[in-house]
Amino acid sequence: MTTVYLAEDQEMLNTALSTLLNLEDSIEVIGTATNGESALKDIIKLQPDIAILDIEMPKMSGLEIASQLRIIKQNVKVIILTTFAQASYFEQAVSAKVNAYLLKDSPTDELIETIQEVLDGKTIFAPELVTSILTSEKNPLTNREIDILKQIDLGLSSQEIAKKVFLSDGTVRNYISSILSKTGTRSRIEALYIARKNKWI
Amino acid sequence: MTTVYLAEDQEMLNTALSTLLNLEDSIEVIGTATNGESALKDIIKLQPDIAILDIEMPKMSGLEIASQLRIIKQNVKVIILTTFAQASYFEQAVSAKVNAYLLKDSPTDELIETIQEVLDGKTIFAPELVTSILTSEKNPLTNREIDILKQIDLGLSSQEIAKKVFLSDGTVRNYISSILSKTGTRSRIEALYIARKNKWI
DNA sequence: AATATAATATGACAAATGTCATAAAAAATA
DNA sequence: TATTTTTTATGACATTTGTCATATTATATT
């Protein structure tokens, strides 16, 4: 009997999914939570074989939980279940050494199979996820440029950004010019649009 | 026995939810779809008592399906089930005369109750939804201003927008100035941020 | 039809944005 | 340590953004 813990903030879906899992002969859902903090505490206490974690939850994300579990050397295997085929989440998942990363678009039997495979010691990434990451635009921006772009997104002027990041106004304008050039855009708004679309910010 | 049709694009959640509903003695899920177009056809063919529809789906939204069902005078009762407490969706739901509008954050038994209430002829809006709509900022912008804001969001310059909407450059700049004034912002990026946050665009 | 209101336009101007060349300082590399 | 690369800065300039006052045109109201 495989013990599973489920963290998913939308209550209706949480209930539906745990009901579905409990219908499997070999699976028992021993606990659920709708926020990340409770989930982490429960997982440490209950020691399930597998934790199935949504990413975006109140108080702590599924990825943060996974990270924490690694840091405190818990043996639970982690399956991230998410809506988002997003490069930065994927990178976090890889560095948190999660055992599987699945999309909610996947058919149910894929989740059941994944549970078995993860127990057998495999690491699973949903193929559509890997495809999506591989085909998305590589972020051409430096960390400094990304930081400045984030400040632009707050609606700050060049002078305001300069003050905030301890650079001169001219330098900020140069960085912005560089961002526009790298993203092939002509204005801040366009650059923001491209960056959001590609999930660089 | 109440017959239910379920449309939800995320396959895993679709399966989980229909499984959950089928566990109810008085409910039978007679069909499901992961896109709006198939859902509409099926609903017309199968004539369920109730259609439970997600909003954001490929090919046709739940709200569009609801509208269509009203137009062709189908008797099915419509429950919209969504992640989004969003004013414009709410308005569409009201004008499509949906029978219930529920959030996925709600507990499961609320859905089961809602099914019963809708069958009894009631109209149900999730209270947190109504609260959220009532407390959100009233959109102060005219239709023209919203249209121009949407063009700004595409990264167009004042001149480009002017050409696109058949106004003079100066008029567009006046409208933008008016938008900034109404939203209490100082720049296009800030105005976009406020408008997005309040779901005016 | 006359009047009031809303939408559009023009003109002038200050400030901000973005470009580009060049230089200086800091960090990395050999 | 010397050299190279990267980051930051300065200066000049053209264009765009945003403000404001005023005028004109179109639409709605009386």
Image: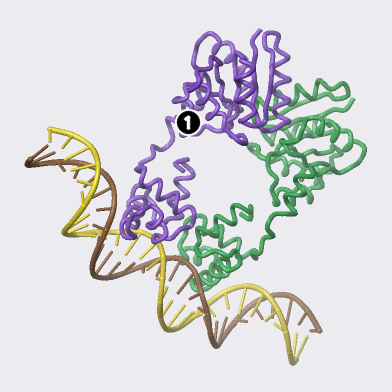
Chain colours: A purple, B green, C yellow, D brown
The correct choice, above or below, for B162 with respect to A136 in the image is: below
Residue B67 x, y percent position in the rendering: 76, 45
Q: Say whether residue A145 is left or right of residue A102.
A: left
The correct choice, above or below, for A52 with respect to B168 in the image is: above
A103 and A128: which is toward the camera: A103
B88 and A147: which is toward the camera: A147
The residue singled out by tag 1 in the image is: A132
Residue appearing at x 73%, y 20% in the figure:
A19
Q: Say whether residue C2 is left or right of residue B180.
A: right
**How many numbered marks are there?**
1
A71 and D25: which is toward the camera: A71
Residue appearing at x 53%, y 20% in the figure:
A100
Pointer 1: residues within 10 angstroms few (<14), some, or many (20+)?
Answer: some
User: Mark 1, chain letter?
Assistant: A
Kindly identify the amino acid type of the residue bearing the numbered disc 1: Ser
The correct choice, above or below, for A112 with respect to D2 in the image is: above
Residue appearing at x 53%, y 25% in the figure:
A66
Residue A68 x, y percent position in the rendering: 52, 25
Residue D22 x, y percent position in the rendering: 54, 87
A94 and A195: which is toward the camera: A94
